[in-house]
Image: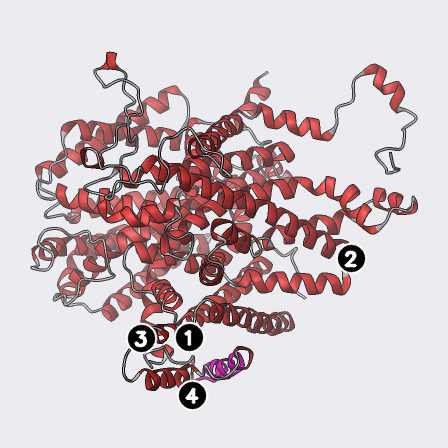
Amino acid sequence: MVSFIARRLVVSVLLIIGAAFIMYVLTSLAGDPLEEFYQSRLPNREQLMAQRIERLQLNVPVALRFFLWLGGAAKCLIPFADACDLGLTVQGQPVTELLPQAMGATLQLVTAATVLAIIIGITVGIVSALRQYTTFDVFVTFLSFLLYSLPSFWVGVLLKEFVAIGFNNFLRDPVIPIPWVIAIAVGTGLLWVGLIGGDMRRRLTVFGVSTLATAAVLVYFNLSNWFITPALGPVVVLVMSAGIGLVMVALLAGIRNRRALLTAGISVAITFVVYFLVQPLLNISSLYTLMILAAATLVVGLLTGFFVGGPDRGQMMRIGAFTAVLSAGLILVDRYMRAWPTYMGLSSIRGRPIATVGAETPNLVGDIWVQGVDSFTHLLLPTLTLMLISFAAYTRYARAGMLDVLNQDYIRTARAKGMPERVVIVRHAFRNSLIPIATIVAADFGALLGGAIITEQVFAFSGMGAMFQRGLSLPDPNPVMGYFIVIAVMAILFNLIADLTYSALDPRVRTR
Amino acid sequence: MSLSHTDIPDPTALEREVETEGVSQGRLILRRFLRNKIAMISLGIFLAVVALALSSSGIFGIPGWWKYSHTDLPKLLDGGKPTLSLIPEWLGGDGIHLGEHPFGQTLIGIDYFAMTMRGVQNSLIVMFVIGILVAVIGTVVGAVAGYYRGWVESVLMRFTDLIIIIPVIVLGAVVGQIANQHFQGLGVLGLSIVLGLFLWTGLARLVRGEFLTLREREYVDAARVFGAGDARIMFRHILPNAIGVVIVTTTLVMAAAILLETGLSFIGFGIRTPDVSLGLIISQNQTAFSTRPYLFVWPGVFIVIIALTVNFIGDGLRDAFDPRQSRFVPRKMKEQVKA
């Protein structure tokens, strides 16, 4: 194993150096940094040119200049030495100063989009595979093809227009018209019918219940002016976390498992009590408090499962932890919602919260909750744009992978020996279908970083993509190379992780 | 006729022919593809778009039937509003007609239908040139690497790895910028050739994998015993058995290529004015969305139509070449159990 990783790392480093060389030469061909001076009539033209030649070492031939650059970049590998040198921009600023801020912005964007796309994409793909050739499956398949064929820049502008501006206009008079209420409710009802399936009677029940429930919620939103002063409140938090607990038990242990129900119940009860206790603390919280609270939630969840114990202690601990963390998430969402009116009232927002450009409102004043809402409103649309496309891809992979697994003999064996369908799907099929997906997801992450270039341009997001694009069109070669080296290292690293995950998950694959 | 394993007369073949007419693999695949409704509808729509784009503005100097070109500057009529009407008169509309400027006019009066058609044409050119280059280079590199193995494979595959590290869009942007800086005259064709020269890596890997397994088959040994040369074995014997991967991957690369080209043109590293790309005109008109949405909608619709139909065609081809995918049908299984 160690020798495998070592060998892969050596090969990867050589590949990165090679690819960096290609990029360096191509970038130098893509534009001459001195071009702007050739036509200029500035009196100190010669001096400026000499300065730039010296900064970018343009008097050295390209091939040699690459090795000078590489020497500087190699110093980044020395830990804690702070000797990193990725060259200067045309303005004389070190690239290493530009990188961290740009990387932070892009990573924030890409991480949120990837995580959401993975969770939603895999869930939808698997449900669609379990309901193969039903209306739901055809709908999902068509949708994923459509999303896959959408140009991200076009979607981005459409989202800006309809979601951002449309929603902001809607907030002026936040009442959903009755025809819309009916349409949304019926649509939601149909979606649930497709998801749950079953015979005619069950379908009708599901449709009726979900349609009426959605309509009731929407009417409540209208009556309580919810879009201006949104909140979940203790009752909704309790009901929703009970629902989460039930789903977790149903998925992981089966609804008849008394101990599992007890674990989830205790977790939910603790959440409900904590909801009241923690509010004063949340009001004065910082990011670190929240992190500590999150860790505490996880521990409490695990402990609940541990003490309930029983023959399958690990399972109980999983149920406890998942229920506790997700329910605590609801408390957090509730608290963010309570910051919404404050945020809307700010002079820099003036009641139009969903932003179309940038990563944050400049000079925003407010506590951590207002800041959080601010990032949310700014990240919402770019994340959605990025997510839609990866969502389509993951749905396709998850569906194909699940169908593939369901065709295997061991699934038939499991069914034949009388396993409940839940165990067949969750334990035998789902886990095995995750193996190929894990590798694809890891490998895709690198590609998504590159793909953020277009999304960043549409939403005027000053991340890595913007840095690359500015560098390429100026032309300013060193930021371009800085961007490239980060992307390449990420891609290689995630590919390595993908391979290792594969060998860890699938014992048939050996790493030698 | 030369000798290869397919041409050797099979002693039992004559007898069998009397019983049933033999169906070749290719015919089976074609039949499966023709039976795929979604793929056939997509093919129809795609061909219709191609016909519309090529016939309306003409190609290779042959004039089309549309009266304006993307460089003409007719007078601005009615503030450049679109005149296309699709609601018939008996439904209270204006009747189905194109009018003077079906998609409207830009601010300076250029006919937007002509511009969009020119953009579609350019996208199609980029798509096909990239498709051809990817198919040829990817197949040859993959075939040579998989067939010869040894140092040839190492060199070719390490080179492939080298290019694969650089994300396609980054490579495309840099290469597009070079094409614009140095080969101003080549335009669309130059851009697509340069892009095609870098996009073959995925296909090469897949073809190599196919060749690695197929080269161990008996018919390859048989062909070699008959004295067939390397090139003949590779391209007449092994390749026909690996053609599915080539066709399917190339189709999907072509669908991705149109998104790549329009995306690059959108961020300014692809096709540039005075020529037209769908991505470029979207980028020019995105700020005008609230006042003149028709300038924004049509190019996007055409990109989606082309990419979607090509994706569906690729998927149909994949199903035709590899029908194993759709085996698990719970409902059918239940029906069988009941019966």
| Label 3, label 1: how far apart the Cα atoms are | 23 Å
Position in image of residue B43 (x %, y %): 52, 29
In the displayed structure image, the side of residue B242 where residue A269 appears, left or right: left
Residue A40: mark: 3
Marks 3 and 4: which is nearer the front? Answer: 3
Q: Which residue is mark 4?
A: A81
Q: Is residue A72 magenta?
A: yes
Marks 3 and 1: which is nearer the front? Answer: 3
Crowding near pointer 4: few (<14 within 10 Å), some, many (20+)? few
Q: Which residue is mark 2?
A: B148
Please name the residue shown 29% across and 49% down the image: B284
Marks 1 and 2: which is nearer the front? Answer: 1
Looking at the rendering, the stretch of residues picked out in magenta corresponds to A65-79
Residue A285, quarter of picture:
bottom left
Q: Nearer the viewer, residue A196 or A262?
A: A196
| Label 2, label 3: how far apart the Cα atoms are | 56 Å
Circles 3 and 1: CB atoms closer than 8 Å: no
Tell which circle, 3 or 4, labels the residue nearer the N-terminal end. Answer: 3
Farthest residue, direction top: B90
| Label 1, label 4: how far apart the Cα atoms are | 21 Å
At label 2, the amino acid type is: Tyr
